Amino acid sequence: MEFLKWSTADHIATITIAKAPANALSSKVLKELSLILDEVEQDENVRVILIHGEGRFFSAGADIKEFTTIENGEQFSELARLGQNLFERMEGFAKPIIAAVHGAALGGGLELAMACHFRLVSENAKLGLPELQLGLIPGFAGSQRLPRLVGTAFAAQMLLTSTPITGVEAVRAGLANHAYPEVELLENANKIARQIAKKSPVAVKAILELFSYTKPEKFHAGVEREAVLFGKVFESLDGQEGITAFIDKREPNFIGK
C-alpha cells in the first residue's frame, strides 16, 4: 500500500491514512481502502476495524489537485460514485468500523468518518463539509448522511455556511459519540474497540445487518442524484474557479454560472 498502513492485534484491524500532509482522499487512497476491506472482511481473526489518520489530520478532504486532472463532469461523477460505493459498503459492513477523528475531518474526510458505524473525536477536532466554499458540493454521499445524523436544519447550516464544528460540538449535534483530549483519543478508541471485539461475532454481525432496515427509502436516489450534480457543478464556471482559486491559494470569485 502506498498511502494506507494497516495492522491487526487483539482482533482489531487498525487502518491508518498516511498521505501527508493532509491525508487527502484521492481515488488511489479510496481504492487502497477497498482492497484492505477485502482482506479484513475475509479474516476471521478481525472483529473490529479502527480508522484514523497519521500526523496532523484524520483527513482534510478529497484530493483537490486530482480534480485538476479530470476532463469533464461525467468523470467527476464517476469519482463521486467510487467514493459513494466504497462508503456504502462500509456503512453496511458486517464488522464494526470505528473512526477516530483528530485534527480535521473535512469534505471527503468527514464523509469517510460518517460512513463508519460510529465516530470518536478529539475535543478540538474540526468537522465539516466546506465544498460550497470552492463552488462545489459534497460527492461521497455527504449531502445524504449528514442530515440523517444531525437533522436537516443543522446540516443545512453546516453545508451552506461551510463552517466546521469542533469535536465537542459534534457530540452535542449527534455527529460523534464521544470527545476526548487529543492525546487520549486513540487509547480510548482502542479501549472501546477491544470491548466490542470481546462480543460474539455472530451477534455483532446480526446487529449491524439490522441497521440496514432503518435506512430511508430515498437514500439511494439521493446519492445517485448527488453524483450527477457533483459532475454538473464541476463543469460550471464557478466549480472551475473554486478549484483554480484553491490551487492558487486565493479567494474565489464566483459569478453564478
Image: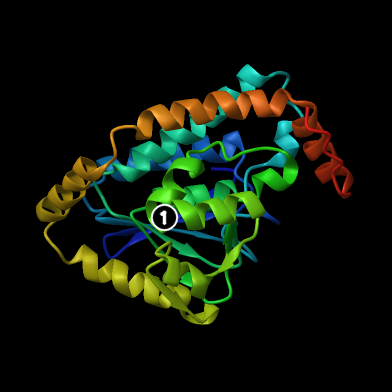
Q: Is residue 163 left or right of residue 246?
A: left
Place of residue 104 in the rendered image (x, y in percent of width and height, measured from the top left):
61, 62
In the foreground, 220 or 182: 220
Looking at the rendered image, the quarter that the C terminus falls into is top right
Place of residue 254 in the rendered image (x, y in percent of width and height, measured from the top left):
82, 38
Place of residue 89 in the rendered image (x, y in percent of width and height, measured from the top left):
35, 37
Q: Is residue 65 visible?
A: yes
In the foreground, 23 or 79: 79
Q: Quadrant of residue 221?
A: top left
Coloration of the structure image: rainbow
At x 47% / y 39%, what residue is drawn? Answer: 141
Q: Is residue 14 visible?
A: no
Q: Is residue 18 left or right of residue 49?
A: right
Residue at the far front: name it: 153
Q: Residues within 10 Å of mark 1 (few under 14, many from 20)?
A: some
Three-letter residue code for mark 1: Gly
Place of residue 202 in the rendered image (x, y in percent of width and height, measured from the top left):
10, 51
* Rendered view: 226 above or below 131: above
* Rendered view: 177 above or below 241: below
How many numbered discs? 1
Residue annotated with mark 1: 151
Q: Is residue 217 left or right of residue 141?
A: left
| Label 1 element class | loop
In the foreground, 96 or 123: 123
At x 28% / y 33%, what residue is drawn? Answer: 217
At x 43% / y 31%, what residue is drawn? Answer: 222
Q: Quadrant of residue 38?
A: top left
